[in-house]
Amino acid sequence: MRKLVESTFMTLDGVISEPQVWGVPYWDEEHARYAHDLVRSADALLLGRATYESFAQAWPSRGGELADRINGLPKHVASRTLTEADWNATVLGTDVAAEVARLKERPGLDILKYGTGELDRTLLEHDLLDELHLWLFPVVVGRGERLLDGLDTTHLTLLGTTTFASGIVVLRYGRSEARGGA
């Protein structure tokens, strides 16, 4: 079965909104290499509507190996408002958990998910998220949308860490079987 892997940028105070504002000073060669490795390990993307819309505006005009890979991957979009999508994307049906479970059963590489929000609650509630890569940036912004706000207690197991010279630490978590699942 394929793994569903989420990659999320976060500040020290738990803010996930507007990483294009606070994250840019830390984006360097190490950051790019890790991001490229995640994309290379996947053959599909899972996105919520807001992430899909922002990515669909930004990525098609970009060039380079990472952009080519992201633009070429099939995208699966969870949305209650979109009925169709372009940019090599399909909109998932109303039972997102069942559709994601079916995607995971297909042969292939990992499914990579970007963006954090309501879709994560569904994925965690249905035990569908296999790995969570939290990119912890050495910055405090004081306000903004927080990571997984409103989610019930969820126990995870630390699978590993990667530290960059810039101060970013990627914390890689997985399901915690001993504590009742992710």
Image (spheres, rainbow, N blue to C red):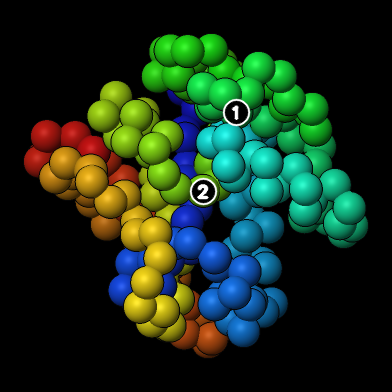
Indicate the position of residue 6 as horizontal and vertical percent values: 47, 46
Spatial separation of the CA atoms under disc 1 and disc 2: 12 Å
Residue depicted at 58% across the width and 42% down the height: 50
Left or right: where does residue 103 sit relative to residue 87? left
Q: Mark 2 packing: few (<14 Cα in 10 Å), some, or many (20+)?
A: many
Q: What's the residue type where badge 1 is placed?
A: Val
Q: Is residue 127 in view from this perspective?
A: no
Q: Which residue is label 1 attached to?
A: 77
Disc 1 is placed on an element classified as strand
Residue depicted at 43% across the width and 12% down the height: 95
- Splitting the image into 4 quarters, where does residue 71 fall? top right
Relative depth, front residue between 59 and 170: 59
- Splitting the image into 4 quarters, where does residue 25 fall? bottom right
Q: Which residue is label 2 attached to?
A: 115
Q: Which badge, 1 or 2, is on the more N-terminal residue?
A: 1
Left or right: where does residue 166 sit relative to residue 119? right
